[in-house]
Image (tube, rainbow, N blue to C red):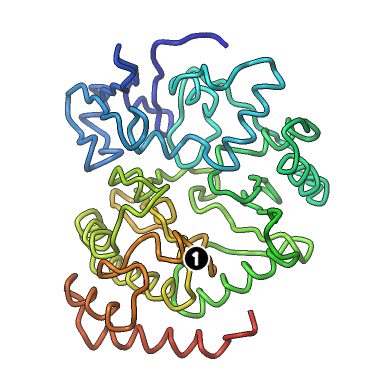
């Protein structure tokens, strides 16, 4: 694959800056002078908006910056990309971050785009979900299978997470659709759909969700509004937190939300999500499962996603609550007090969600 020594980063056709790699294989980034005057910080805690060359640390993103690491595929997306490259005779282990970002090009999550653009995307609105699910299952079960790899790659868009998934355009709307992995129950899609409805009933802000063909869970992309791309950064990318292991406590996450959004209503939304995660035992609440978005010149907590019961990190919440992996009701109230949430408000939220979760217990 062609070697490159820099990648230009764009946001809504405006050049944000240039990304390169040092002799020590660390990313170096510099904002474009015009963007310094007219733009915003794409990563407020690690890339403040000023004229300076920023050099990344070695960890936790192997010499990269979190905001750009968010744009790269991980989990299922990495599997598909690497298998696709091998089919093309390219050794994926020899690619550096610049080449990988060029492969993302204009087809990644969020609003950032990268040039040169080596991305591939399918424009086909006729989707055979059953065939895609079958191809995904074969890829998971075999190191050799290449059937369907090109189609899955073109529908990839740098997705993360362990479960197979595709980005699709249906009736001019963009959706993320998931398939079951080998360890999932047959009705995995229906289970996640029902939990999305429960979350909405509990006051959790979520994108529109749908059960395609009565078995494939889909969620409308919240990083897209009509034709516009929304700049989105995960808590992992924002805080440079390692999402592959426990690295956050909800107290710190809530404080970061307040510092970033400067809006207590956004903090209350995140607190409500924390309570919901604890009460349904969604322990896979790692740092990439929370995101923030920049639009209307302000930062906002993103809609919730990936919320359903899960084992987490050795049976513990990956994001701890009051420094505990197995928190109780009192820990939820202690966190509220620490972050400045009125005790009456916190108790009301906990009681409300307890009641709704209890009301459907055993039926999901």
Report the side of 19 relative to 315 (left or right): left
Instruction: From the top left corner, tell me how far across and down residue 47 is, in percent.
Output: 24, 34
Residue 51 against residue 76 in the figure, above or below: above
Residue 46 against residue 315 in the figure, above or below: above
Instruction: From the top left corner, tell me how far across and down residue 320 is, in percent.
Output: 32, 64
Residue 352 against residue 82 in the figure, above or below: below
Residue 135 occupies quadrant: top right
Residue beneath the point at 37% across and 50% down: 293
Report which residue position mark 1 lands on.
206
Number of numbered discs present? 1
Quarter in which the N terminus is drawn: top right
Crowd rating for badge 1 (residues with CA inside 10 Å; few <14, some 14–19, many 20+): some
Residue 84 vs residue 113, the one in the foreground: 84
Residue beneath the point at 48% across and 34% down: 72
Residue 77 occupies quadrant: top right
Quarter in which the C terminus is drawn: bottom right
Instruction: From the top left corner, tell me how far across and down residue 282 is, in percent.
Output: 48, 68
Q: Secondary structure at mark 1?
A: loop
Residue beneath the point at 33% across and 83% down: 329
Instruction: From the top left corner, tell me how far across and down residue 31 is, in percent.
Output: 26, 25
């Amino acid at each position: 694959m062609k070697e490159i020594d820099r990648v230009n980063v764009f946001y809504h056709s405006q050049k944000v800056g240039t990304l390169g790699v040092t002799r020590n294989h660390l990313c170096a980034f510099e904002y474009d002078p015009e963007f310094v005057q007219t733009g915003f910080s794409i990563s407020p805690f690690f890339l403040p908006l000023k004229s300076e060359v920023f050099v990344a640390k070695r960890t936790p993103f192997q010499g990269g910056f979190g905001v750009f690491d968010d744009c790269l595929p991980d989990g299922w997306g990495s599997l598909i990309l690497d298998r696709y490259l091998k089919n093309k005779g390219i050794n994926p282990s020899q690619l550096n971050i610049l080449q990988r970002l060029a492969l993302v090009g204009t087809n990644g999550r969020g609003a950032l785009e990268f040039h040169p653009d080596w991305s591939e995307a399918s424009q086909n609105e006729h989707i055979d979900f059953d065939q895609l699910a079958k191809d995904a299952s074969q890829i998971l079960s075999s190191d050799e299978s290449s059937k369907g790899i090109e189609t899955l790659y073109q529908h990839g868009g740098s997705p993360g997470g362990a479960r197979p998934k595709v980005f699709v355009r249906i009736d001019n709307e963009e959706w993320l659709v998931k398939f079951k992995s080998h360890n999932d129950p047959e009705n995995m899609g229906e289970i996640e759909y029902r939990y999305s409805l429960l979350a909405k009933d509990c006051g959790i802000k979520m994108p529109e969700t749908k059960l395609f063909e009565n078995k494939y869970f889909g969620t409308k992309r919240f990083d897209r509004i009509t034709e516009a791309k929304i700049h989105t950064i995960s808590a992992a990318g924002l805080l440079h937190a390692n999402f592959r292991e426990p690295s956050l406590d909800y107290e710190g996450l809530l404080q970061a939300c307040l510092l970033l959004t400067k809006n207590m209503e956004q903090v209350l939304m995140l607190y409500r999500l924390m309570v919901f995660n604890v009460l349904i035992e969604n322990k896979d609440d790692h740092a990439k499962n929370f995101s923030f978005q920049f639009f209307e010149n302000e930062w906002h907590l993103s809609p919730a996603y990936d919320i359903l019961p899960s084992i987490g990190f050795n049976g513990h919440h990956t994001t701890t609550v009051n420094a505990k992996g197995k928190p109780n009701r009192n820990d939820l109230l202690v966190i509220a007090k620490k972050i400045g949430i009125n005790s009456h408000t916190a108790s009301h939220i906990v009681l409300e969600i307890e009641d709704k979760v209890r009301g459907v217990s055993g039926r999901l």
